[in-house]
Amino acid sequence: MRVERLISRRHLVSRERLLRIRLTALIGIIAIAIGVGALIAVVAILDGFDASFHQKHMDLVAHVRVLPPDGADDAIFADPATIAEALAEDPRVVAFAPLVDRECFLLPDRDLGARRMGVRLLGVDPEEVRPVASFVDETRYGHGEPGPDEIVLGQLLATQVLGVRPGDTVWAITRLVVDAHGFPHVRWQPLRVVGLFVTGIPDLDMATAYVNRETAERIFLLPEGAVSAFQLRIADPYRAATDARAIAAAHPELPVRLQTWDETNPEFFQALQLEKVGTFVMVLMIVLVGAFNIIGTLVMIVTERTREIGILKTMGASDRLIRRIFFRSGLVIGLIGAGLGLALGLGLCAVLGRLEAPLDMYEIERLPVLIHWGMVALIMGVSLAICVVAALVPAMTASRLDPVEALRHE
């Protein structure tokens, strides 16, 4: 057994007068284990929610949206048939659907002073949209096949904002029109609520509604067959940006803009990432507490063993050997703590993944837990790096002790 291994082990597990040192080392191990375990569990939960929201978003909305060029008249395609033909022939496009995509105000009655909400109102053919975006299949109350002058609302929009249910009538303010005398006035349109859908994405359920395409053309005063967007589904949604560029490059003659699914709601996904980073940093503070315990433990060992260090140096021990002794002691604390933390974190993930989490708003029944082994390796690496840095400080201090002064130490 190498001498530094023997001495460092005796520093940590000796049965002599250094009980308080061993207790401090134990506290450091526990702090590191709790920090690493909490990091693994918390990040796994955040990754689970992230993956759940991404999957929901990709299932419910189009992977790619084809939009008219900036400045297009009434923001609709001049020749939608040509674009539909090009999309039908493109091998990257699994399915596509035309729609009318507009914004309007919805009110529970014809009163400008009533509660109102600006919403995204889609004009769709459910049969065409179903292979592309599954929100038309998420109806919980009523049905999702609106007829003339009928509308399907997001449940949060209907219940929390408008206070309506299937069978009630809402009023849509679709645009300002100018009468024969040149006076502007709002265009009102009554729409009967026939269904409420629940996607599990609050932003979608709070601010989205849809009607059939004929109703949308009429209430927005659009020409027959008008199309303001095409929704596309591709084979791999994570390659949406690459495929969108390839589609645009394959059809340079088409005057279109392409928008991928992650560009439709970038603030939401950026917020998820910021939340994950912030949580990671906060929980990492627990590991730092453990690192300070390592420093405290080794400083106490150096203080208690100053004379022994002096004796070792007078017997020929080099500064490097002294450094290795105390560095090994700190590294052992870090390795044990990180190893216990790994077991604790994986155990927590196994338990939490079985817990029921009735998050009705998000349509989630169990707490989502997703372990990314790359992230686990990163957590272990960062934790061990912190422990290594913490061990270096007292190890360097011990190696620089003057042997004469050390032998005089009481």
Image: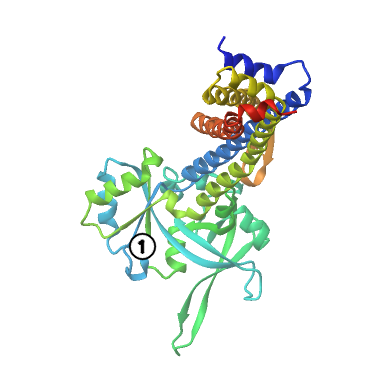
Q: Nearer the viewer, residue 69 or 175?
A: 69
Where is residue 292? Give x, y as percent. Answer: 66, 36
Q: Is residue 348 visible?
A: no
Which image quadrant: the C terminus? top right
Question: Looking at numbered disc 1 in the image, what kind of residue is underneath it?
Answer: Ala
Report the residue marked by disc 1.
226
For residue 325, side relative to residue 26 (left or right): left
**For residue 405, above or below residue 231:** above
State which quadrant residue 216 falls in: bottom left
Task: Give left or right: position of 158 versus 304.
Answer: left
Rendering coords of residue 303 (x, y %) = 70, 30
Residue under the point 31% across and 44% down: 243
Q: Quadrant of the N terminus?
A: top right
Residue 140 against residue 254 in the figure, above or below: above
Q: Quick one: which residue is furthest to the top in this view? A: 1
Kindly tell me whether residue 205 is visible in this rendering. yes
Q: Quadrant of residue 71?
A: bottom left
Quick one: which residue is furthest to the left in this view? 253
At label 1, counting other C-alpha atoms closer than 10 Å, the crowd grade (few under 14, some 14-19, many 20 or more) is: many
Residue 226 located left or right of residue 198: left
Give the side of residue 196 with respect to residue 55, left or right: right
Whether residue 239 is situated above or below residue 71 in the rendered picture: above
Q: Nearer the viewer, residue 176 or 288?
A: 288
Q: Residue 268's spot in the image, x, y percent?
A: 53, 52
Q: Callout 1: helix, strand or loop?
A: loop
Camera-nearest residue between 162 and 237? 237
Residue at the location (59% across, 35% down)?
393
